[in-house]
Amino acid sequence: MFQPGYEELAFDAMRGSVRTMHYGADCYAYALVSSGCADVVVEADLGLYDYCALVPVLEGAGGVISDWTGGSLTLSNHENSKGRVVASANLLLHSHALEILNTPAVSSDDIFTLSLADELLAVPDGHIPSMFPPKHRN
């Protein structure tokens, strides 16, 4: 779960900005973003083992993956990232997701120790997700 305070407010901001959300997809969510079938994944409380292998996959597919501040997901930056990961299909979506995640009215200094992982697979509001073939779009 996203912890009360900064994470919960950031999650609420993202939830209010997307058209569709899916929960519990784990690494499959990153495969969906990498293949163009989803736009954004937001997670908290990930360990190095949860995201290290995903970085080259996402970036190799043309996507962008970082912590919630836009910092690199590296071994040396794990302490700073606190296991908070956002992955996007492209740089424009990533910039927008980071802006949303960093708009809560709580300082990033209000950081909590996390105990449970949760994720958000999101599609920006007003955007028709690429997971729907053209014949099914409105």
Image: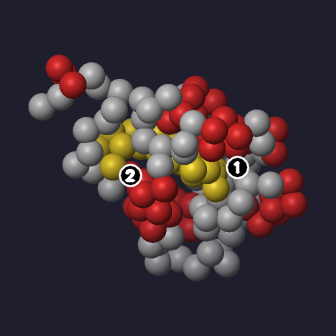
Q: Is residue 19 above or below residue 28?
A: below
Residue found at x 71% / y 60%: 72
Q: Position of residue 73 (x, y in %)?
A: 74, 54
Q: Which quadrant of the figure has residue 123?
A: top left
Residue found at x 42% / y 57%: 92
Residue occupying the far left of the picture: 138
Q: Position of residue 106 (x, y in %)?
A: 53, 77
| Earlier-in-chain disc, 1 versus 2 | 2
Q: Is residue 132 above or below residue 75?
A: above
Residue found at x 42% / y 29%: 37
Question: CA–CA distance between discs 1 and 2?
Answer: 18 Å
Type of amino acid under label 1: Asp
Q: Position of residue 31 (x, y in %)?
A: 57, 28
Residue found at x 33% / y 56%: 17
In depth, the one of 103 and 69 nearer the eye is 69
Q: Which quarter of the image is occupied by the C terminus?
A: top left
In depth, the one of 94 and 100 nearer the eye is 94
Residue 66 falls left or right of residue 46: left
Q: Is residue 100 above or below residue 29?
A: below
Which numbered tag is attached to residue 45? 1
Is any atom of residue 47 visible in this view?
yes
Crowdedness near tag 2: few (<14), some (14–19) or many (≥20) residues, C-alpha within 10 Å: some
Type of amino acid under label 2: Arg
Residue 117 falls left or right of residue 79: left
Which numbered tag is attached to residue 88? none
Q: Which quadrant of the figure has residue 58?
A: top right
Q: Is residue 91 above or below residue 134?
A: below
Residue under label 2, please give it: 15
In depth, the one of 99 and 92 nearer the eye is 92
Circle 1 SS class: loop
